[in-house]
Amino acid sequence: MTSTIARTAYFTAALVLALALAGCATANLALPVNQPQTAAAPNEQPTLAVEGDVVALSFSGGGARAAAFSLGVLQGLREMPRAGGGTLLDRVALVSGVSGGSITAAYFGQHGAAGVDRFRAAYLDKDWESDLHLSLASPLNWARAYDGALNERDRLGDWLDKEIFTGATLGDLWRPGHARTWINATDLYTGVPFAFVPAYFDALCSDHASVRVADAVAASMSVPVYFRPTVLASYADRCTKPLPAWVAKAQSDRQASELLRVTARAFAEYRDPARVRYVHLIDGGVADNFGLSNLILMRRAATTPFGPFTPRDAVRVRRLTFLVVNAEQGRDETWPLTPTGPDGPETLRTAMDNAVNVSKQRAYDAFRDMIAIWERDVRGYRCALPKAQAARLSAGLKNWNCRDVRFAVDMISFTDLPAPQGKTLAAVPTRVSLPPGTIDALIEGGKQAVKTNPAAQALRR
């Protein structure tokens, strides 16, 4: 009995101490990573400035597995020459990323083609998993988990900034000549996808360009409990710019898409200090592990048949090919072979996986439908233009035809590879660091998959 009491007293003391230490450690780390917007420096509303054949990419979540597979796709595009000179990598105008895929997307957005050969050394070859709190065996980690997360911003955002992005801000990603980069997270309170793009920061009355790239990526990677949510402040009390008209319209339009309606409500709450003062962002894969929902939203919020393209973009684009790079982990369970089925932890894990998979599958289907309608609307706009305006916007293009515009969507995944190879790569665990040999295999798999992809092949002709 005495030993039991002693053990209980020791455990209680350890837990109290752990809670106290965790509280001290986290007090200064849950600070907002954004600054207020000023009238003198409004958020730039970017354009793609597309022309001819255009490639857009979306990199799914999946830790270092996704980052390495996405890097292979970039390398494969660089090795694919296109008619008229250059490579398919030269035609990438937009890249979207979630969680592990957001690291590759952001690095490419920051450095362009020159960063493709440097990314592996910058991230993939570094083993920083040992610096993270991942085990729930110690009382201090119990306290961290109870307090909100095993790892604070200094173990994720600050590491990403020091080791990979070296002080870069979102303004550095959105410079002319760089692929437009969308980093996707999830608003924990509203459940809506959140993109680190100017429109969302306008809703917060916040400056977009000054946010560190590392903090955007950290938000996209913040798996609940393992990493503390990234915090953004709403500066509604300093706002001088009203919300766009689509926000009020979507809230009252019962026929509008539900994605548009819930995002409009979230934007309105960002402007209401009685409802939201801080936005807490977690892993983008919770809402959409393909990072497509925010792109769907921007199209549905557009007030023109070509938006978010500009009139010039709509006239000068010929082919828009959107490749979704899916690095999801495969399943190889034995419980479907037994009548008893899964145990408790297996049931919980599978149910959570299914929730993520269903949301991204629906987003992919909705995205394909949206792209088909967008193509139709752009074609209709082009062919309805007065001849003089069409001639001015298409100046310099040979044999321009208003009907000659095609948008396509396709997916690149481990299932595109030969069965043994694809199954092996799909079995790679979701971790922030992987062995060099596994990284080699994932990069090679990405290169092979994109080179055999029909939509990518069509761009070479």
Image (cartoon, grey):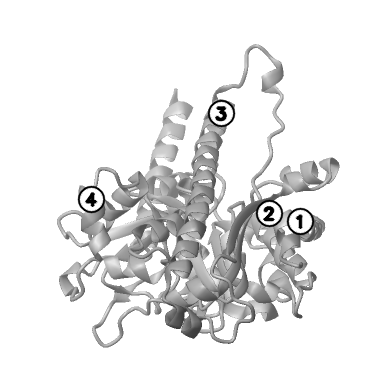
Amino acid tagged 3: Pro
As drawn, 398 above or below 424? below
Mark 4 and mark 3: Cα distance apart in space: 40 Å
Disc 3: which residue: 345
Disc 1: which residue: 442
The answer to which of marks 4 and 2 sits earlier in the sequence is 2
Observer-side mark, 4 or 2, equals: 4
As drawn, 310 above or below 132? below
The answer to which of marks 3 and 1 sits earlier in the sequence is 3
On the question of residue 417 being in view, the answer is: yes
Q: Position of residue 213 (x, y in %)?
A: 49, 72
Q: Position of residue 407 (x, y in %)?
A: 58, 60
- Say which mark, if any, is on residue 65: 2
Left or right of 26 on screen, residue 441? right
Mark 2 and mark 1: Cα distance apart in space: 7 Å
Instruction: Evaluate if marks 2 and 1 touch, with contact meaning CB atoms under 8 Å apart.
Output: yes
As drawn, 46 above or below 350? below
Left or right of 350 on screen, residue 232? left
Q: Quadrant of the C terminus?
A: bottom right
Q: Position of residue 87 (x, y in %)?
A: 74, 75
Residue ID at (43%, 81%): 389
The 10 Å Cα crowd at callout 1, few under 14, some 14 to 19, many 20 or more, is many
Amino acid tagged 2: Arg
The 10 Å Cα crowd at callout 2, few under 14, some 14 to 19, many 20 or more, is many
Disc 4: which residue: 251
Residue ID at (51%, 63%): 155
Mark 1 and mark 4: Cα distance apart in space: 44 Å
Observer-side mark, 1 or 4, equals: 4
Q: Which SS class for mark 4?
A: helix
Q: Which SS class for mark 1?
A: helix
